[in-house]
Image: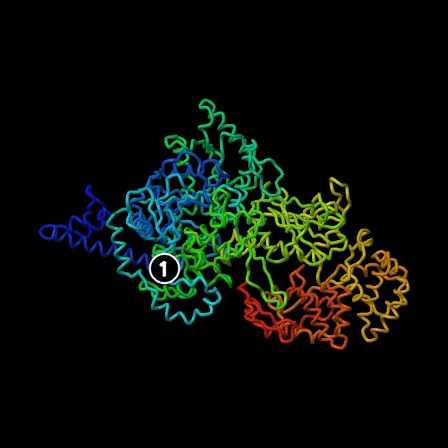
């Protein structure tokens, strides 16, 4: 009978009385008498309950996670931070205080899952470490008591999964979570590779490890301790509004600051045994049982409260390249705007986005934020994420005009987005208009109600999470609470292997990392340079970015540091040592022990781009001292480059066209960073051509690449030094393919999971410009239309005009649509490289017939006499002499001579072709500079082609003749001097890739270089450990840093 009674009262056991006592407590207090039997039964029930709950943590199954991120976005100075303070019950300070980067508030409010009431949480009693236990227990009890439904107070979301390819591989985590004993997780269905710092606590963070004073209520710098929202311990709570937390401590297993990442990695194996002694596990079964019993006794889990985490995004332009790293479809977005101003009213003293010539207005910023959110958040569920508009500054509008103003504002919002592709994501019916300085404003309650409804309708609210993750999550959380920021993969593997609760095998552990990364609970990139470390406290990345990507109002006041930020905003360049000095500040010292790893992450995210340098004598890669930070550049291009060089006579153009009217700045900034890492930044009129939304790099000595933002387009120009008609199609096609791939990678990075590749339409399409570089036609239409007349200029274009962007690299002959060289190209004097290409493809027997038409018969005789055994050099030299001696030595003269010989003038098209260099040399070698030793080994193997090789590499004829004169009897010495002269030139990076292409172009092939590289270690190229040339004229050696 007692057993049956307890079965009915299992939930009652933990119900507290008025003085906080549970029946278990009351029974336990009575040692004797009639309570003894009750006590025994209660103890039995408690132990059974605890065993059951512990098994749910350790075994199969799942728990439901009720967490919602509310990301509050807008331009600066519209009241975002004040609004967040009102929502979490804080007082709003007088005056305006800007947000530096991202401010997070967590653990201050939540939603009752059964009643849907907004619950305020006393920060003095909040303990994040109990969160995961509460989640597991409240879900478990609910499943036991109400098996017919998952959650009594939750309506099933109307959101539907978007149709995606590979349906067998892409599942909702909700349905899969309960099916697997260990990992009921399908990673491809857990989108977002972004390091979503999602579940945090609103405690002021001190990364330095030093004592900190309590921040004033007016400052919005409350960053989270633990993003997972799962476990983290806290100091003993007081009744103060915020708890100061020291995040840094001194990590026990951090590498020395001076130790490079490569050294750490190379010594991994030797450290494993030592690691076993250092790593300890805190999550024993006894400890978990003890903590669970504590949570069970409180009975708090019976009140099912989901958490709301508010992300307050800084609104200054410089942050717009870093914010998107943390955006996710799992969040609810609030886009805030000043309701006291019209949407089309000009905002004074505000620069518009790069390439935007429109007047900066609230409408422009609303479009920007909506486009950014929908660009960076993968659409997994139809209409998710939701975007709620909130108008502020109601207090600036007369009371009698508020409703009229509200109607006008939201009619303008409706009009602004009436044809927007993402309209189904927009919440337009709430029409919220608040006074964000008044906690008693009734509209705040309306906003809370709207947030509640949208939260309960979100498909990620109450999603199933695997219980198997919990023990390791708790271990990691303990380390975060102790001040640890980063673990090496070896440390994490060791932590898992010594677990006293459960041990995941290696494959499960890697699945755990990918899964937790997709949820934003940690940061792990499975790439060669980053895979050896795990950031267990993801908010470290918020601090990293805030340390140097920050608005002028937050620049350090110290003179030296302030000058660093000023220089960075003007040139986009920051020195390595400058970053070290920034990170030596109290708030950022925890970054320093992992600076090389952090550098690599920032480069991977394209926040930084390396400015690579090489030793001019050895070719060794020098330490990277300078980094480009494109998002910090606010200066606009005011040079004459576009007017003088980027003209219809010299350039061709295509556009990446985005669907919105405003391109999210992070996309062009990341594309600019990628260009900087591939090519050399061009200088023009004494200026480096890097500006906000604009860059020019040199592809080779004849071609420049321009990337710039113009309206809703990212424009790509290929500029030739003399004529657009001489642009090499293989170059244009290669650059286009490279940038398209880069754009896809950038878009895919924000939108996909770790294991899921591109499965949805990209946010841009390609369009080709007319010959005047102003009108555009879509790529799809251009390739299907035989004739196109542009609207503005009435210029006729044929399908062959687009071949330059789509050259078949395997076809050495002109296709049927080839129109030959343009009139402008025919009027140009050929360069040495162009003459070399012509001579290589022109039959030697026909050269005897051509020279009379060029009036070069005597010179041809002399040259062939000097080069009786090398007709290839003779052909090239006679054409070079012709260019020097004749006033009208242009392509037209060559074409006329060919016509007289009854030879097709399409032979000249070969000057615009380069053969695709195919090689088995690994990609990671190709962007390295060849060392002395490599060039010494290559020189004897090239043979009698130093003239052709030198010309192809850009050396002048005068230089080549001097080399020949100085080494007349030594072919190897001639080749060697050519190679060293080439490597000293820094107009274009003298990489192995360039050398491979040159050897292929002159017909030698790159196999000889490939054989040499078999004996060259990649680390030798990248770190250059005292490379010495075996016969080079200079033996200077320098060491290199990791690439």
Left/right placement of residue 679 relative to residue 192 reads right
**Which residue does the image show at 59% across and 46% down from the upper left?**
692
Pick out the residue farthest to the left. Answer: 33
Does residue 925 appear in the picture of this structure? Answer: yes
Image coords of residue 715 (percent x, y) = 65, 48
Residue 858, by quadrant, is: bottom right
Q: Badge 1, how many Cα within 10 Å: few under 14, some, many 20+?
A: many
The image shows residue 57 at horizontal and vertical percentages of 32, 57
Q: Is residue 881 left or right of residue 32?
A: right
Q: Residue furthest front?
A: 559
Q: Is residue 1032 above or below residue 203?
A: below
799 w.r.t. 83: above or below: below
- Decide which of 251, 403 is in the foreground and name it: 251
Give residue 630's position: percent from left, percent from top. 57, 50
The quarter of the rendered structure image containing the C terminus is: bottom right
Give the residue pinned by disc 1. Answer: 472
């Amino acid at each position: 009978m007692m057993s049956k009674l307890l079965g009915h009262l299992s939930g009652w056991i933990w119900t507290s009385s008025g003085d906080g006592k549970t029946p278990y407590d009351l029974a336990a207090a009575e040692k004797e008498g009639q309570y003894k039997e009750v006590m025994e039964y209660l103890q039995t029930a408690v132990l059974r309950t605890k065993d059951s709950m512990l098994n749910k943590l350790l075994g199969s199954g799942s728990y439901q996670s009720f967490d919602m991120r509310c990301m509050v976005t807008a331009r600066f100075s519209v009241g975002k931070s004040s609004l967040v303070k009102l929502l979490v019950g804080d007082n709003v300070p007088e005056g305006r205080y800007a947000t530096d980067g991202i401010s997070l508030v967590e653990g201050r409010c939540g939603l009752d899952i059964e009643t849907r009431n907004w619950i305020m949480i006393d920060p003095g009693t909040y303990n994040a470490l109990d969160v995961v236990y509460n989640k597991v227990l409240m879900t478990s009890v609910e499943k036991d008591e109400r098996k017919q439904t998952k959650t009594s107070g939750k309506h099933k979301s109307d959101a539907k999964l978007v149709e995606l390819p590979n349906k067998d591989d892409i599942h909702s985590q909700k349905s899969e979570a309960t099916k697997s004993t260990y990992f009921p997780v399908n990673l491809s269905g857990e989108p977002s590779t972004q390091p979503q710092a999602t579940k945090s606590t609103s405690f002021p963070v001190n990364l330095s490890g030093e004592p900190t004073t309590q921040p004033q209520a007016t400052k919005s710098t409350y960053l989270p301790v633990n993003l997972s929202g799962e476990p983290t311990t806290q100091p003993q709570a007081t009744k103060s509004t915020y708890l100061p937390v020291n995040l840094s401590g001194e990590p026990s297993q951090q590498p020395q600051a001076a130790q490079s990442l490569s050294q750490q990695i190379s010594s991994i194996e030797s450290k494993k045994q030592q690691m076993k002694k250092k790593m300890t596990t805190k999550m024993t079964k006894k400890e978990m049982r003890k903590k669970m019993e504590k949570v069970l006794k409180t009975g708090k889990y019976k009140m099912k409260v989901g958490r709301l985490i508010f992300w307050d995004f800084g609104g200054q332009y410089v942050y717009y390249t870093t914010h998107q790293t943390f955006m996710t479809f799992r969040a609810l977005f609030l886009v805030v705007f000043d309701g006291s101003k019209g949407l089309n009213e000009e905002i004074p003293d505000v620069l518009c986005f790069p390439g935007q010539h429109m007047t900066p207005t609230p409408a422009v910023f609303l479009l920007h934020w909506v486009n950014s959110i929908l660009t960076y958040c993968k659409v997994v569920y139809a209409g998710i994420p939701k975007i709620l508009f909130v108008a502020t500054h109601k207090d600036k509008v007369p009371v009698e005009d508020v409703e009229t103003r509200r109607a006008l504002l939201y009619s303008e919002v409706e009009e602004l987005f009436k044809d927007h592709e993402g309209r189904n994501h927009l919440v337009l019916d709430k029409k919220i208009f608040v006074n964000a300085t008044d906690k008693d404003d009734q509209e705040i309650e309306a906003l809370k109600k709207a947030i509640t409804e949208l939260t309960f309708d979100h498909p990620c609210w109450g999603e199933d999470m695997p219980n198997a993750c919990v023990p390791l999550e708790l271990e990691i959380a303990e380390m975060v609470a102790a001040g640890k920021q980063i673990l090496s993969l070896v440390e994490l593997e060791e932590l898992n292997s010594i677990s006293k609760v459960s041990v995941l095998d290696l494959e499960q552990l890697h699945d755990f990392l990918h899964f937790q990364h997709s949820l934003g609970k940690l940061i792990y990139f499975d790439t060669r340079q980053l895979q050896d470390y795990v950031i267990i406290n993801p908010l470290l990345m918020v601090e990293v970015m805030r340390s140097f990507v920050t608005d002028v109002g937050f620049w350090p006041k110290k003179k030296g540091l302030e000058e660093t930020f000023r220089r960075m905003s003007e040139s986009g360049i920051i020195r390595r040592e400058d970053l070290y000095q920034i990170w030596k500040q109290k708030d950022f010292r925890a970054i320093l022990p992992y600076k090389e790893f952090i550098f690599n992450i920032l480069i991977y995210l394209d926040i930084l781009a390396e400015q690579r340098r090489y030793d001019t004598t050895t070719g060794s890669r020098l330490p990277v001292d300078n980094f480009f930070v494109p998002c910090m550049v606010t200066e606009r291009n005011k040079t004459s480059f576009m007017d003088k060089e980027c003209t219809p006579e010299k350039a061709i153009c295509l556009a990446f066209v985005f669907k919105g009217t405003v391109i999210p700045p992070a996309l062009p900034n990341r594309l600019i960073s990628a260009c900087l890492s591939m090519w050399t930044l061009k200088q023009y009129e004494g200026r480096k051509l890097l500006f906000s939304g604009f860059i020019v790099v040199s592809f080779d000595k004849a071609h420049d690449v321009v990337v710039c933002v113009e309206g809703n387009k990212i424009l790509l120009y290929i500029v030739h030094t003399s004529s657009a008609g001489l642009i090499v199609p293989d170059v244009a096609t290669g650059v286009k393919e490279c940038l398209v791939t880069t754009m896809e990678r950038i878009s895919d990075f924000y939108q996909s999971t770790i294991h899921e590749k591109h499965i949805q339409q990209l946010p841009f399409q390609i369009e080709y410009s007319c010959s005047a570089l102003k009108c555009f036609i879509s790529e799809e239409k251009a390739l299907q239309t035989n004739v196109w007349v542009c609207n503005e200029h009435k210029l006729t274009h044929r399908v062959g005009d687009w071949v330059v962007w789509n050259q078949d690299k395997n076809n050495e002959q002109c296709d049927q649509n080839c129109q030959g060289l343009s009139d402008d190209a025919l009027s140009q004097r050929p360069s040495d490289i162009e003459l070399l290409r012509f001579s290589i493809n022109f039959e030697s027997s026909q050269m005897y017939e051509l020279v009379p038409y060029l009036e070069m018969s005597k010179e041809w005789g002399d040259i062939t006499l000097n080069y009786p055994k090398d007709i290839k050099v003779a052909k090239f030299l006679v054409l070079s002499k012709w260019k020097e001696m004749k006033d009208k030595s242009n392509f037209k003269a060559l074409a006329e001579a060919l016509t007289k010989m009854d030879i097709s003038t399409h032979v000249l098209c070969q000057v615009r072709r380069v053969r695709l260099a195919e090689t088995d040399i690994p990609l990671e070698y190709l962007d390295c500079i060849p060392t002395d030793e490599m060039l010494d080994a290559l020189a004897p193997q090239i043979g009698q082609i130093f003239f052709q090789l030198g010309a192809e590499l850009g050396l002048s004829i005068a230089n080549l003749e001097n080399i020949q004169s100085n080494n007349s009897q030594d072919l190897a010495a001639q080749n060697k001097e050519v190679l060293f002269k080439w490597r000293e030139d820094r107009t274009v990076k003298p990489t192995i890739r360039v050398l491979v292409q040159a050897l292929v172009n002159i017909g030698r092939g790159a196999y000889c270089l490939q054989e040499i590289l078999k004996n060259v270690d990649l680390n030798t190229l990248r770190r250059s450990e005292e490379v010495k040339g075996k016969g080079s004229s200079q033996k200077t050696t320098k060491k290199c840093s990791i690439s």
